[in-house]
Amino acid sequence: MHDFIEQEVEPRIDLIDSQKDLSIAPMLLEKAGELGFLAIGVPEEYGGIEMDFLTAISNNEVGGQAHSISLVVGVQTSIGIAPILLYGNAEQKAKYLPKLVSAEWKTCYCLTEPGSGSDANSAKTKATLSEDGSHYIINGQKMWITNAGFSNIFIVFAKIDNDPNLSAFIIEESFGGITKGEEEKKMGIKGSSTRQIFFENVKVPAENLLGERNGGFKIAVNVLNTGRIKLGVSAVGVSKKCIGYSVKYANERIQFGVPISSFGAIKHKLGQMAALTYAQESAIYRTAYNIDRAHDDMIANGMDPIKAKSKCVEEYAIECAMLKVFGSEMQGYVVDEGVQIYGGMGFSAESPVERLYRDARITRIFEGTNEINRMLTVDMLLRKAMKGQLDLLSAAKKVSNELMAVPTFGDAPEGSLGTEKELVTKLKKSVLLIAGAAVQRIGMALKEEQEILLNVADMLMHTYILESTVLRTQKRINLYGEAANEAQIAMTKIVAIEAAEKTAYAGRQAIYAFADGDEQRMLLLGLKRFTKVQPYNTKNARRKIADKLIEANAYCF
């Protein structure tokens, strides 16, 4: 993938973004098909390469550095091939997958409409079943459809007759009745084709219903889970690329007789950019490994391998949502700081970071806005509790009782990360304390209190990111020792300080929103206890990290 980007994408990127030659993107998609990038995780019988989720995620990290071409490839795989692979019947898989894997056929995912974005199930596109049941007539409009300009296979979501929920269809351009709008003029990702698509009396064979009738919304949601974690790992790849550009420029740019990389303000930026990237990477690969392990366990227990692919990602939907949010916001921070390090040159289209900056903004919007994903995080957690899969209320009550007891003061935590491990436990308690109190006070009406849901989601997210970072660094220490991991330990401690501060802030905002009087005071005291951290010199930590980057003249972690 590195070679593909270097040899095929980078030399053409200015021409790609100019949109003067619209044949380049589909041509590169075909090259990606030839190289097997579209085949990872698809069974060999359909022309695929049966590899694990970690392999797909690793490939997506590097692929994220392909600018807008990463979207072209990502749509073909994550939300084009995946719906047919996971929900198609044997005939549909045999007919479509081999040609999609090779990119002989190109595909796009048609969900969003002018009147339905986040509220996807309110879509107005209609499918009317013929009297003899042989076909559907589909009418409607879709917008913001990536790869639309060159796709000939469309995954389309519509409501059949008066059904309450969406159904999904595989529609071929050859069926007729399909027209496309002009290319959208966008802030970034200019090299990807984005158009409206209009369906007028499109006659679709009944056998092209994908999955079950009324089951389209479930397909849309589950497929997006995979897209979210892949978006999160693409953010890691882009951030590493941006840090590499930034370090090289800082080493080359001379001011006051010295490279600007020698200045503390620049080292602060580089150290922070690296710490956040390292944290997201830690959480991504932890989650991907857990998804693979769950997949293997399901197969060992007799589940169909394809069904297991869908089910195991569904099990980690909460993590996928958090990783999309943290990753896209981390990426936004990193590319913004990259432009700042470049100074005036960063604002020029001649600089490499300018394109990274523009392209990054969309990541907080698609695959579900970050606000929607935050609310989904808490909603899915509460649903698991209601189903009895998680005993949140008992755990929350235990934490609440702990506040009424006299605090215990044990021995100081052992090891270089002992304090951070202890903090992870305390942050989990802070989430339980506030989420439990909110549920008890507000009940089912909590789902209408979006501000509180956003606060609790941030607490969850920062706790998960920190725990993942601690686990990774501890594993590295066990393998290579503390001396070889000074920078990684420094990054982990920075992430810990910030996780505690951000959890404390989000927790206070939530408490102010639903509690008052003695209850408010008790919750604030508890939050303060659980988010208290030991003082740590983050300035020196960032300098230590930056010095490693500056010496390597590249991202080196």
Image (cartoon, grey):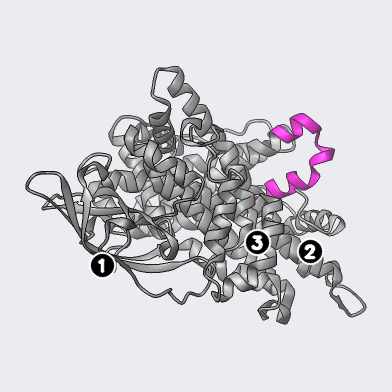
Q: CA distance from mark 2 to mark 1?
A: 44 Å
Q: Is residue 433 above or below residue 450?
A: above
Residue that label 1 marks: 115
Q: Residue at x 74, y 65 (%)?
A: 245
**Circle nearer the viewer, 2 or 1:** 1
Is residue 251 visible in this depiction of the protein?
A: yes
Residue that label 2 marks: 247
Q: Nearer the viewer, residue 172 or 138?
A: 172
**Sooner in the amino-acid sequence: mark 2 or mark 3:** 3
Residue 65 picture location, percent across and down:
64, 57
Q: Which three-letter amino acid code belongs to the residue tagged 2?
A: Val
Q: Which three-letter amino acid code belongs to the residue tagged 3?
A: Val
**What range of the chain is rendered magenta?**
475-500
Residue 532 picture location, percent across and down:
58, 48
**Circle nearer the viewer, 3 or 1:** 3
Q: Is residue 251 above or below residue 166?
A: below
Direction top: furthest residue: 301
**Marks 2 & 1, CB-CB < 8 Å contact:** no
Q: Nearer the viewer, residue 53 or 137?
A: 137
Q: Is residue 532 left or right of residue 108?
A: right
Alpha-carbon neighbours of circle 3 within 10 Å: few (<14), some, or many (≥20)?
Answer: many
Q: Which three-letter amino acid code belongs to the residue tagged 1?
A: Gly
Q: Which mark is residue 97?
A: none
Main SS category, magenta section: helix
Residue that label 3 marks: 9
Q: Nearer the viewer, residue 352 or 418?
A: 352
Residue 519 picture location, percent across and down:
35, 50
Is residue 497 visible in this depiction of the protein?
A: no
